[in-house]
Amino acid sequence: MSKRLSSLIATAAVIAVTAALAFAGGAGAASSLPTLNIALTGTTGVSVSGSTVSGAVNVSSTFSGKAPSGPNSNGPTWGLVRLNPGASILQAVAAVQSHHGDINALTPYGSLFADGSASGTVQTALSPGNYVALNITGNGNPALAPFTVTQSSSPAALPAAANTQIAIEFGFRGPTVLRDGTIVRAQNAGYLVHMVIAFGVKNPATGRQVMALLRAGKDGKAQKLINRQFITLAGPISPGGMQQQVLHTKPGYYVEACFMDTQDHREHTQLGMMRLIRVVK
């Protein structure tokens, strides 16, 4: 994750953890998917159990212990890294560390293809290969749990999404109206690491004002205009990353945004990577 998370995102992460979950596991087809379990303990523990075969899975996460608060915490958060053939987790970690936490440095060795808040459930698709589950609750070095995904003779398929939000450089594609209670997919179709999050605003005029402030790098002033509704469609995910969830949040207007940093330490919002969306019943 970007080393310089804005105060806006740090505050929103705390809200997301302490408030009701914005997403929950879907019914029907989702309930029939195999489950990969990720258990987080504080900032230093992570374990994996359940289905480790290729195909669609529910990723079910839990958290126990105490998470740090304030700007040094992401809230209880997990990530899944798929390593490239021949790459090791030591190479991947060293590359990110040598680039001061820039997840884009992971690309030659693997991809952060899914992540989420714990406790909760998201859906993604696993391909055969070597993986690492991460506990990224703190902003320090993550805890690691390697595991291997083997080829399934009958891989499960992901339930169809009603809406797909696509991140690219430097914007979003897909419908701007999301329906509560439906499956929403988040996908990174760009060449850089992106996040797909949204935070509530009072009305479209306020949303446009917030976006103008974010474009100018005035995150603190923008923060004063947002409300306590916060949606995480995807935290930082690498190119090709994809996950989906059932949307359960309050209808209204939201600013969809990416706060990852460029190489010159500008947030992607300063390059215009945000837009106004609406959630309806």
Image (cartoon, rainbow, N blue to C red):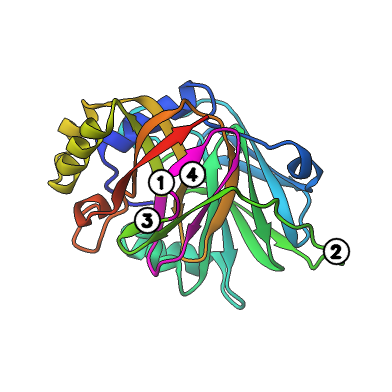
Q: Amino acid at mark 4?
A: Leu
Q: Tell me the kind of residue under disc 2.
A: Ser
Of badges 2 and 3, the one in the foreground is: 3
Q: Which residue does the numbered mark 3 point to in the structure image?
A: 172
* Numbered range of the magenta stretch: 174-195
The answer to whether residue 29 is above or below residue 64 is below
Q: Which residue is mark 1?
A: 176
Looking at the image, which residue is at 56% across and 74% down?
Answer: 87
Residue 23 image point, x, y percent = 57, 34
- Asked if 231 appears above or below 185 in the picture, the reply is above
Q: CA distance from mark 4 to mark 2?
A: 28 Å
* For residue 71, above or below residue 241: above
**Residue appearing at x 46%, y 75% in the figure:** 108
Q: Badge 3 local density, few (<14 within 10 Å), some, or many (20+)?
A: many
How far apart, in angstroms, are the residues tagged by discs 1 and 2?
35 Å
As measured in the structure, the alpha-carbon distance from the residue carrying label 3 to the one carrying label 1 is 9 Å
Image location (x, y in percent) of residue 34: 79, 48
What residue appears at the point 72 percent right and 68 percent down from the top-left corner?
A: 128
Residue under the image location 19 percent in, 52 percent down: 270
